[in-house]
Image (cartoon, rainbow, N blue to C red):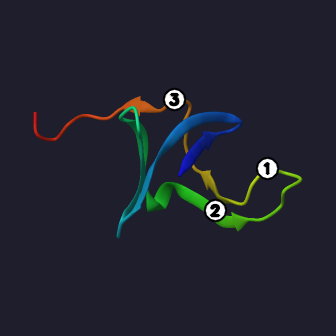
Amino acid sequence: TEAFIQSRQLGKGTLFIAESRLSWVGENNTGFSLEYPSVALHAVSRDLSSFPQECLYLMIDGNLDEAEPLENENG
């Protein structure tokens, strides 16, 4: 799965959808995690004139400028 913030590609990674949050972890161990109340809108977009491939579109209530290094819970 590839992640983009605006038009900036974050790289390939894994998307996790859980009961209370959505998280994406990149191959370089950066990523983001959103609690569902911060997701204002979500949709599957198939409009290739807006984006070059089909995608999951998210509009969030907040700021997600940079993907951050994820902390290892084991230490």
With 72 as the anchor, is 58 left or right in this view? right
Q: Please tell me which residue is depicted at 83% across the width and 61% down the height of the picture.
A: 47
Q: Earlier in the sequence, mark 1 or mark 3?
A: 1
Q: As drawn, which residue projects farthest toward the right?
A: 49
Q: Please tell me which residue is depicted at 35% across the width and 70% down the height of the picture.
A: 19
Q: Quadrant of residue 17?
A: bottom left
Nearest the eye: 35 or 25: 25
Q: Quadrant of the C terminus?
A: top left
Nearest the eye: 35 or 27: 27
Q: As drawn, which residue projects farthest toward the left?
A: 75
Q: Which residue is mark 2?
A: 41
For label 1, the SS is loop
For label 3, the SS is loop
Q: Which residue is mark 3?
A: 66
Query: Is the residue 19 above or below the residue 56 in the image?
Result: below
Query: Is the residue 21 above or below the residue 25 in the image?
Result: below
Q: Earlier in the sequence, mark 3 or mark 2?
A: 2
Which label sits on residue 65? none
**What amino acid is labelled 1 in the image?**
Phe
Q: Position of residue 40 (x, y in %)?
A: 60, 59
Q: Position of residue 12 (x, y in %)?
A: 51, 42
Q: Please tell me which residue is depicted at 16% across the width and 41% down the height of the picture.
A: 73
